[in-house]
Amino acid sequence: MWPWKKLKEGFSRLRQRIARAFSAGDREGLEEVLIEADIGVECVQALLNESRGEKKKLAELVSHILSKAQKPFEFSSRPMIVMMVGTNGSGKTTTIAKLATLWKPRKVLIAAADTYRDAAGLQLERWAARTGTDLVSSEQGQDAGAVVYDSLHKALSGDYGVVLIDTAGRLHTRKDLMAEAEKIRRVAAKVIPEAPHEVLLVMDASTGQNGLRQASGFGEALGVTGLVITKLDGTSKAGVIIPVVKRFSLPIYFIGLGEQPEDIAPFSAAEFTKALLGE
Ligand SMILES: Nc1nc2c(ncn2[C@@H]2O[C@H](COP(=O)(O)OP(=O)(O)OP(=O)(O)O)[C@@H](O)[C@H]2O)c(=O)[nH]1
Ligand SMILES: [Mg+2]
């Protein structure tokens, strides 16, 4: 399956360094590589203490931690309302294009609720055209809530199976933008009581622990229900996924592996562990 091949290729340098440190019995070197991979100092110590120099044991421990986050995405409702949140540039809009491609047979509608940045609407229009997905854009002066309101009504009347809500990038410290995201949720719930059915936090793996710290305030504030980890193609900080799983205790539904609409895969703990630590 190609996504895992791509992940394996991206992690090959890291995997080789880990393998070399193991075969040389170099605990310090191993510690260094794993910390550089952004697993986090405390977590690395705990893993190395428990695995006692055995690569197989380390792989088992990592796989066990990651397996807690492996859960298939379920469509509990029709239309299924899915809202994307995250810091600036984490990959929300690109992930929407990817999910629209993946879920095309379900009939997808995209809600362009990033009304904060002018270029955002244009970017989505291009993706919608390229992926052949229907889009509700913001009219002049419309706020994010209004776009979501229109989108959900259109979804109901047009028998859409999924609505993907794009939102502006934000930090949880930005009170105005956090209030806006809260408003989107309220408006959605007014049209469809259970909506949004999923709030996905999109995180950029290549920003490592720093990105994790930035995204940490989102969970509680916006009722995040699941994660998408992007930019796992070729990052040297892929180990951050371990502290991410520990920090959020939420399913990682998908991983992003590139900039094209096909570059997405459901998360697999076993495949991820293999890519990081080898067979
Ligand atoms: N290599 C790689 N690049 C990605 C991936 N996902 C997104 N990108 C790139 O990251 C950049 C930002 O992606 P966007 O989807 O615009 O991010 P965003 O979260 O919508 O950004 P804002 O709306 O500005 O907050 C773009 O150049 C994307 O092509 C991925 O999985 N791998
Ligand atoms: Mg965007």
Image (spheres, rainbow, N blue to C red):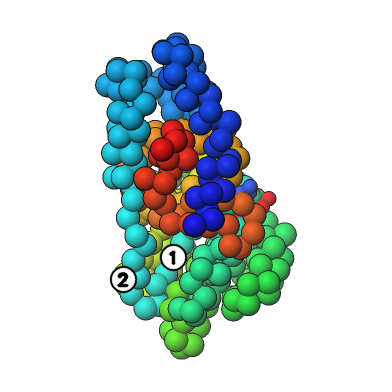
Q: Position of residue 40 (x, y in %)?
A: 43, 25
Nearest to viewer (mark 1 / mark 2): 2
Looking at the rendered structure, which numbered label has been put on residue 82? 1
Q: Residue at x 61, y 52 (%)?
A: 258
Q: Residue at x 39, y 33 (%)?
A: 243
Of residues 73 and 215, which is closer to you in this image?
Answer: 73
Q: Secondary structure at mark 1?
A: strand
Comes first in the chain, label 1 or label 2: 2
Asked if the beta carbon under badge 1 is closer than 8 A to the nearest atom of ligand 1, the reply is no
Is residue 134 depicted above or below 111 in this figure?
Answer: below
Q: Is residue 24 left or right of residue 259?
A: left
Q: Secondary structure at mark 2?
A: loop
Q: Position of residue 162 (x, y in %)?
A: 45, 74
Q: Where the C terminus falls, by quadrant?
A: top left
Q: Is residue 135 left or right of residue 75?
A: right
Q: Is residue 192 left or right of residue 160?
A: left
Q: Position of residue 268 (x, y in %)?
A: 39, 50
Residue under numbered circle 2:
76
Please, what is the three-letter code of the amino acid marked with disc 2? Answer: Ser
